[in-house]
Amino acid sequence: MLDELEKLYTQSLETLGSAQETAVLEEWYRDTLGKKGKIYLMTRQVGQLSKEERPIFGKRINVIKTELQEAYDGRLGELKSAELETEIASSAIDVTLPGRPVTAGGLHVVTQTLREIYRIFGDMGFQIYRSPDVETDAYNFELLNFPPHHPAREMQDSFYTEKSDVILRTHTSAGQIRAMREYHPEPIRVILPGMCYRNEQITTRSSIQFTQVEGLAVGENITFADLKGTLTEFAKRLFGADRKTRFRASYFPFTEPSAEMDVTCFLCDGKGCQICKYTGWLEILGSGMVHPNVLRNGGYDPEKYTGFAFGMGPERITMLKYGIDDLRLFWRNDLRFLQQF
Ligand code: DAH
């Protein structure tokens, strides 16, 4: 029986050594060292041995048990780490793969124009004054000298709310009254940028919103010469030092006198082209001396104070600058358009 035991021992070691998977090892364990395994079955046969043989056999079988257990543990460790290695190798991260580029966003082209305008007026001492998009009829029209049925309201088809006197501002001029009421009787030099809302159905180019930059200067001894000087200097800084300006008489209820400013076309330099419709001039903004009624509504005595105001559309300026022919492109979020700027 001892011979049989030794044979079992060497055979078991051999199969253990040749096992290549942990699953095979586990099977081996059940067969050999398990509760009903071969070693156990051998111990059960001890009774068949003589008294002298029993202790020798018993000792030997114990030694073999421990050795097989150790051999099993060792082999299991080897196979486990080998299996882990192959798993790591097969699912490894390929560090040589190029990374995904982080795309940097950019400023919307109209925002770029706005910031350019802020910078120029900032250099000339104008502060930015913010006023609300949702306005009352009073601020948007009446206090700016548009009486309730004045025909000038026709040009600004408004968005009304459920409250009869609350509207979306149709122009940034509404903020003029707010700035004056806040600062009077101190002198004022502000620009008022922001979104304006009008229902416009010009052929297919319907639009409902656009930005404006309003300007307001109020103080003593401010004249039309200050208006012309400031706006001409602005045009040169924005469009180039050799731009010329001209002022054409116009009408706005809140200014008197009123004027529109043109600059010589920066594409053809005044010679005439498609952009300036062969006139050589581009209309850039509306302006005028603040009407005495408006000064009074803002808290200033028109006998003592005067002022000038102006308003421009950054979208229009951007369209002229880049030859963009459709206002709706600014709102479409088409990257092919936006990435050009
Ligand atoms: N509010 C006018 C508009 O939306 C633009 C404007 C014209 C503003 C003349 C002014 C100004 O301040 O003096 O059409």
Image (tube, rainbow, N blue to C red):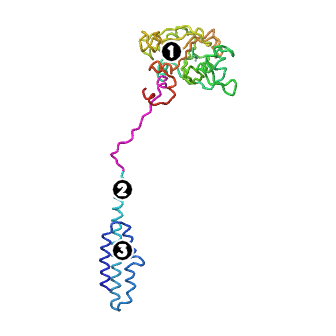
In primary-sequence order, the first of circles 2 and 1 is: 2
Q: Residue at x 39, y 70 (%)?
A: 26
Q: In the rendered image of this protein, does residue 103 appear above or below residue 62? A: above
Pick the quarter of the image with the N terminus.
Answer: bottom left
Q: Which residue has dot 1 on it?
A: 284
Is label 1 in a helix, a strand or a loop? strand
Drawn side of residue 8 relative to residue 127, left or right: left
Pick the quarter of the image with the C terminus.
Answer: top left
Drawn side of residue 108 relative to residue 222, left or right: left
- The secondary structure making up most of the magenta span is loop
The question of residue 222 being in magenta is answered with no
In primary-sequence order, the first of circles 2 and 3 is: 3
* Image coordinates for residue 273, horizontal then vertical, percent: 43, 12
Q: In the rendered image of this protein, does residue 70 appear above or below residue 57? A: above
* Image coordinates for residue 192, horizontal then vertical, percent: 55, 21
**Res. 88 mark:** 2
Inspect the image, locate mark 2, and give the three-letter code of the amino acid beneath it. Answer: Ile
Is label 2 in a helix, a strand or a loop? helix
Q: Quadrant of ligand 1?
A: top right
Q: Which residue has dot 3 on it?
A: 69
* Image coordinates for residue 267, horizontal then vertical, percent: 42, 15
**Quarter assignment of residue 144:** top right
CB of mark 2 within 8 Å of CB of mark 3? Answer: no
Q: Which residues are magenta?
A: 93-114
